[in-house]
Image (cartoon, rainbow, N blue to C red):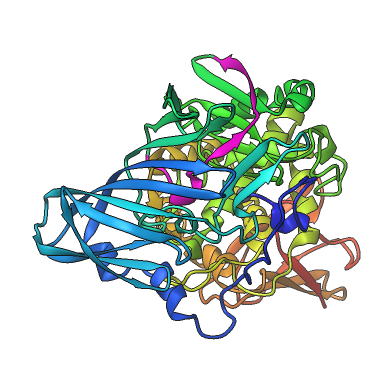
Amino acid sequence: MGFAMLAGGQTSNPTPSPSPAAPQRSRGHGEPTKADILRGAYGPYRANNDLLSYHLDIRIDPEKKFISGKNTIRFRMLKDDSRIQLDLAEPLKIDKILLGAVPLQYERDSGAVFVDFPGTLRAGRVYAIDFYYSGSPLQTGRFGGFTFGHDQSGHPWIYTACEGIGASIWWPNKDQWRDEVEDMQISVSIPKDLVDVSNGKFMGKTDLGDGYTRWDWFVHYPINNYDVSVNIGNYQHFSDRLGGLAMDFYALPEDLDKAKKQFAQAKGMIEAYQHYFGEYPFKKDGYKLIEVPYSGMEHQSAVTYGNRFANGYLERDWTGVGISPRFDFIIIHESGHEWFGNSVTAADSSDMWIHEGWTTYLEGLFVEYKYGRDDGLKYLNGYKSKVKNQGPIITARGVNGEPPQDQYFKGALFINTLRSVVNDDRRWWKLLHDFYQHFKYQNIMTEDVIAYFNARTGMSMTPVFNQYLRHTAIPALELRFDPGHGTVSYRWKVDEPGFEMAVRVGKKHNWQVVHATTDWQTMPTSLEKNEFEVATDLYFVDVVKQ
Ligand SMILES: [Zn+2]
């Protein structure tokens, strides 16, 4: 996800006139609304079909701030039924929904659109409907939703960023995380002096003869709805290659020199992630980096960038330990999402740590790849100051909303803890690589992650995952010293039954591994209470000395 939220707002966004931001829901506060359940749940009229492809074909009028067009939605029925659920935000008008030439009936409820067919659709068969719509989408949500803006030279600058609020704020789709199309065509018609950069491979542009040009893009892979984007502006283009991977960059003319310098970092980041996880996931689509006025977003194969062409995050030392100023935070973070978030995807936003915890951990891997183990550890541990521990990272399933920010920082520190639990880097690197390869292009839940880690390590890691992800507190190692006998007793204080985790204690560079459980155990020590340490850089735990 982009970091507008964490930055406290947009970057030097020149002109858009923001409408009042929609209230941001987070889960766990009060009862979910009906709209949140319709959006968040995988209800029966979603579960009865499987998406195959979209062709989004729209015309965007910057003067009128108006979109019109259609999405052709192909799907396979999984059971006999005569109704499916799609989604489109209410300010947008449904012009018609056609099955072939037959207009379909529909019912709108909050953001949901229930489409009714005149007869029963049969399980196993493939259908395609054309969903025509028009209107002025809302500029809303943390990242702007759909924004009609201008750059400083007065050219239109139109862009989308809708992860939290949902893609259905600007186009009709099955707006949930579990089911993705297998590929997608994106056709965007805009005034001919502008450029559209969307996801996927650029297929060509067509002069429509009425002052508009249609830009055609093709996404060869599954894609999250919220990743689908348009970026329309007075863009200049330059390109590069990394082996067989096409890299394309887009910036405004006034920023072109800065972009050529800063965007050169993208190559090294992709190399680092390829080292750990394997080939860039969307090779046929290429990798794109596109200037926008908000901080950034991981739009699949079309990462958007607004980090002021400077290292760190919005010119700050992001984790506060002197390492972040060596590289561009938005390029490293948003590009990491190509592996976790875009390729490996959570099936419900409740388990979004699979995107954000993992991608934040990937930042640490980039640092380790480039600057070594000590700096990687230091960088990740810099995140400790951002962890709040006010609620579990995993939130209620089937409800629209977003887990707390701890999913980023605590999530990354937890994964770093897992490495110490595995306690064998050769095995750890192979585990990470194979984990990604096993789940790439899939939509998974935490249970899938745990099952994989348990199977591959031969360890029962379920209680460890549960304590970090499903409870508020991190494990606390309680230590009781008995100087008279020269011993220390230790146990974990946790919420999760059956929790046990080996941990390194004693003196740095000469750690002793103890297999701590929730029961008191005693070991001899020659160290005094104030000398006795726990390897808290390697394990994200509290220490309570008694
Ligand atoms: Zn993110």
Q: Position of residue 200 (x, y in %)?
A: 45, 31
Q: Position of residue 418 (x, y in %)?
A: 59, 52
Where residue 501 sits, quadrant-wise, is bottom right
Near-viewer residue (17 or 439): 17
| Left or right: 249, with 211 as reference point | right
Near-viewer residue (509 or 339): 339
Q: From this viewpoint, is residue 364 visible?
A: no
Q: Residue furthest front?
A: 210
Residue at x-position 33% and y-position 45%: 181
Q: Is residue 239 magenta?
A: yes
Residue at x-position 26% and y-position 63%: 47
Q: Start and end of the magenta stretch?
A: 222-242
Residue at x-position 39% and y-position 51%: 443
- Give the quarter of the figure containing the C terminus: bottom right
Q: Position of residue 83 (x, y in %)?
A: 20, 66
Q: Is residue 311 above or below residue 544?
A: above
